[in-house]
Amino acid sequence: TTCHAGFSCLSLAIKYEGQFLGFVFVDGFVLSSSKDQQISDISKYVQNHISQSSYLEGLEKIPVLSEVDLKYITQLIRVVIDEILEVVKEIENYEEINMD
């Protein structure tokens, strides 16, 4: 998906024992497969919100992710989610131990 300004977004849900805990969210990149259209959309958006010189410099710095890159970042986010869930389990275990 894309955000209001045209950047690609990736979000993965964090669930623990069927309960929704939140999201891990990544934004601020474009996909190589839709780079031209996204850059055009971003350009239209930022022209109304940022000075011309800043916006032109910024366009050159936008990360462009290939499908392989996107799969990799998805895997990294899953690692982050796994770590978050481990902390949730530790807190749950700590609370159970200290309630006895």
Image (tube, rainbow, N blue to C red):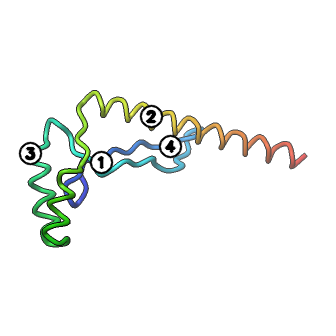
Density class for disc 4 (Cα within 10 Å; few <14, some 14-19, many ≥20) is some
| Front one among 37 and 56 | 56
What separation in Å lies between label 3 and label 2 (alpha carbons)? Answer: 26 Å
User: Mark 1 sits on what residue?
Assistant: 9
Q: First in sequence, mark 3 or 2: give its number.
A: 3
Position of residue 23 measured from the top left corner of the image (x, y, whole percent): 46, 48
User: Mark 2 sits on what residue?
Assistant: 76
Q: Of tags 3 and 4, which is closer to the observer?
A: 3
Density class for disc 1 (Cα within 10 Å; few <14, some 14-19, many ≥20) is some
Question: Contact, CB < 8 Å: mark 2 with mark 4?
Answer: no
User: Mark 3 sits on what residue?
Assistant: 36
User: Mark 4 sits on what residue?
Assistant: 14
Question: Contact, CB < 8 Å: mark 3 with mark 2?
Answer: no
Q: First in sequence, mark 2 or 1: give its number.
A: 1
Q: Is residue 23 left or right of residue 71?
A: right
Position of residue 85 measured from the top left corner of the image (x, y, whole percent): 60, 39
Position of residue 21 measured from the top left corner of the image (x, y, whole percent): 54, 49
Q: Residue at x 45, y 47 (%)?
A: 24
Amino acid type of the residue that numbered disc 3 sits on in the rendered structure: Asp
View extreme (right): residue: 100
Q: Residue at x 49, y 50 (%)?
A: 22
